[in-house]
Image (cartoon, helix red, strand yellow):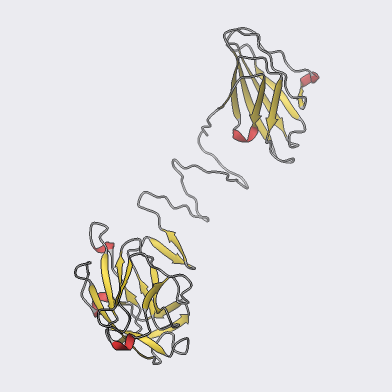
């Protein structure tokens, strides 16, 4: 098997050697696949020949092969498959076999990994239980010396190992959205997002109205929505509008005002609101009367232009 070193964290191979090619097929906790580990001097065939230790691992007599660990891809359940790397041979003394997310051993991988005994002693081994949550690529290396091993791939993994960070692959019910393609989003929520350029909406946009609570002092947070409703049970003497868009951007919102069963409630609009003629409209006073207003600002809330969309609409 020819091995070519591309970098310390990526090795290309003509053939990735499946574990079942050097051991049994799929193992369990009670009957794991067992691979004999020995240590000997590196040859030119070693993927890290010339780097790190002068010694390398041999798996069932093969020098530092790239291996493939099977897991839950071969059954209908999420059963784990167990592989035992037997280090009882005396050549392993001082060379504990461990797993990492990178060949440089920056981040150890320990999930599902168990060890027993001391490397080079009878009964010593490192064992890994492989599932769909085992990273797509892990590295087997000596915890005491550099670049003695190679890597293992896990074809059925749901986790991509990228720059020592694990990224979960989407499930069958997850929709992937490309950055350079046109995608249809169904039942998706965009939080704190921004659209740039021209956005073409080919169907109605549904928005939930924000209900304000009546009181003598009321705050309307413009960033919370674009349609606000309030049923007046008080005369609002202080009406504060907060969080408009920055100057140069636009904030626009609709305000639906409903009188309660008593009626004749009033609102003192903010001084920054400029209605036509410079005078705020008088609210409809009848019980349950509805007035609708529209407000727009382009200067960060310094001035709001106010428009009466309809009154006495009970």
Q: 88 or 243, which is in the foreground?
A: 88
Q: 227 or 243, which is in the foreground?
A: 243
Where residue 86 appears, x then y in whole percent?
27, 79
**Residue occupying the point 22% across, 69% down:** 27
Left or right position of 208 against 155: right
**Which quadrant would the C terminus be assigned to in this image?**
top right
Q: 186 or 107, which is in the foreground?
A: 107
Q: 161 above or below 291?
A: below
Q: Quadrant of residue 259?
A: top right
Q: Quadrant of residue 248?
A: top right
Q: Quadrant of residue 273?
A: top right
Q: 266 above or below 29?
A: above
Where residue 272 appears, x then y in whole percent?
77, 27
Instruction: Give the total number of marks visible in the rendering.
Output: 0
**Residue occupying the point 36% across, 49% down:** 173
Where residue 245 appears, x then y in whole percent?
69, 38
Q: 104 above or below 225?
A: below
Where residue 13 appears, x then y in whole percent?
38, 80
**Residue occupying the point 70% across, 27% down:** 240
**Residue occupying the point 30% across, 88% down:** 90
Left or right position of 255 against 174: right
**Which quadrant would the N terminus be assigned to in this image?**
bottom left
Left or right position of 186 against 31: right
């Amino acid at each position: 098997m020819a091995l070519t070193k591309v970098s310390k964290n990526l090795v290309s191979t003509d053939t990735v050697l499946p574990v079942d090619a050097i051991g049994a097929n799929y193992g369990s906790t009670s009957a794991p696949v067992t691979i004999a580990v020995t240590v000997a001097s590196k040859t030119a065939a070693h993927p890290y020949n010339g780097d790190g230790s002068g010694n390398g691992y041999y798996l069932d007599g093969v020098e530092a092969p790239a291996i493939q660990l099977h897991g839950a891809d071969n059954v209908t359940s999420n059963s784990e498959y167990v592989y035992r790397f037997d280090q009882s041979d005396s050549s392993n003394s001082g060379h504990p076999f461990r797993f990492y997310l990178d060949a440089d051993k920056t981040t150890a991988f320990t999930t599902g990994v168990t060890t027993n005994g001391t490397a080079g002693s009878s009964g010593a081994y490192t064992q890994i239980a492989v599932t769909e949550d085992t990273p797509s690529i892990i590295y087997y290396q000596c915890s005491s010396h550099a670049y003695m091993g190679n890597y293992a791939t896990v074809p059925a993994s749901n986790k991509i190992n990228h720059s020592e960070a694990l990224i979960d692959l989407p499930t069958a019910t997850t929709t992937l959205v490309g950055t350079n393609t046109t995608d249809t989003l169904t039942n998706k929520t965009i939080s704190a997002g921004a659209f740039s350029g021209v956005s073409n909406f080919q169907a109605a946009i549904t928005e939930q109205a924000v209900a304000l609570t009546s009181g003598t002092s009321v705050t309307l947070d413009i960033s919370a929505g674009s349609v606000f409703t309030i049923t007046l049970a008080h005369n609002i003497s202080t009406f504060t509008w907060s969080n408009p868009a920055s100057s140069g951007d636009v904030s626009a919102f609709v305000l639906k005002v409903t009188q309660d069963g008593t009626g004749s409630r009033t609102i003192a609009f903010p001084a920054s609101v400029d209605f036509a003629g410079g005078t705020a409209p008088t609210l409809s006073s009848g019980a349950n009367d509805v007035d609708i207003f529209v407000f727009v600002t382009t200067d960060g809330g310094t001035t709001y232009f106010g428009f009466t969309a309809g009154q006495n609409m009970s």
